[in-house]
Image (spheres, rainbow, N blue to C red):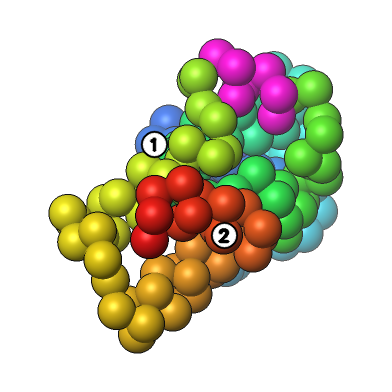
Amino acid sequence: MISAWDKSLDLLSRAEHSALDLKRKLRNKGYDQEEIDEVIRRLYSVGYLSDERYARAYLRKFLPVKSVHLICRELGQKGIALAPEDPLVSEVLEEEGIIEDETVLSLISRKLRGNDQPDEKERRRLYAYLQRRGFSYHTIEKAMSSLGV
């Protein structure tokens, strides 16, 4: 059987992982908890595992389609405590040039595909879609009003 260290390196070579995700994957592969904990400590010490690097990658990937609040909640479920007011979030938003209000406008435009006068059923679906993406009612209403939808 391949060692937990080698399996971890294999997983990390494909994509960034949070420590919690990596532990779960190793546990599912049958490695014992003591070995997993030792591997995680080693990965952190050599810099192969980084919560900040993972959070940055996750933010970059999902900020164009989800709200900051939802992303922070998802990161919390992955073992990385991050608040929307955290400097890391602000830094990534600035680096990527993302403004949440513009993200909502973009998602609305993409969903409507030129249909600038949706009926009530389409409007409800659009609201539900945007709320599932983590945007507040106020943010959605503001964007819809600015587009005249």
Residue ID at (48%, 70%): 127
Image vertical order of residue 9 relative to residue 32, above or below: above
Q: Disc 2 marks which residue?
A: 141
Q: Main secondary structure of the magenta part?
A: helix
Q: Is residue 108 left or right of residue 82?
A: left
Find residue 131 and report its horizontal and vertical position in percent: 56, 67
- Asked if the stretch drawn in magenta spans residue 83, the answer is no
Residue ID at (53%, 68%): 132
Residue type at tag 2: Glu
Find residue 113 and report its horizontal and vertical position in percent: 18, 56
Residue ID at (82%, 41%): 83
Residue occupying the far top of the picture = 95
Find residue 84 and report its horizontal and vertical position in percent: 77, 40
Q: Disc 1 marks which residue?
A: 14
Q: Is residue 43 left or right of residue 97?
A: right
Magenta-colored span: 89-95
Choose top left, top right, bottom left or bottom right for residue 95: top right
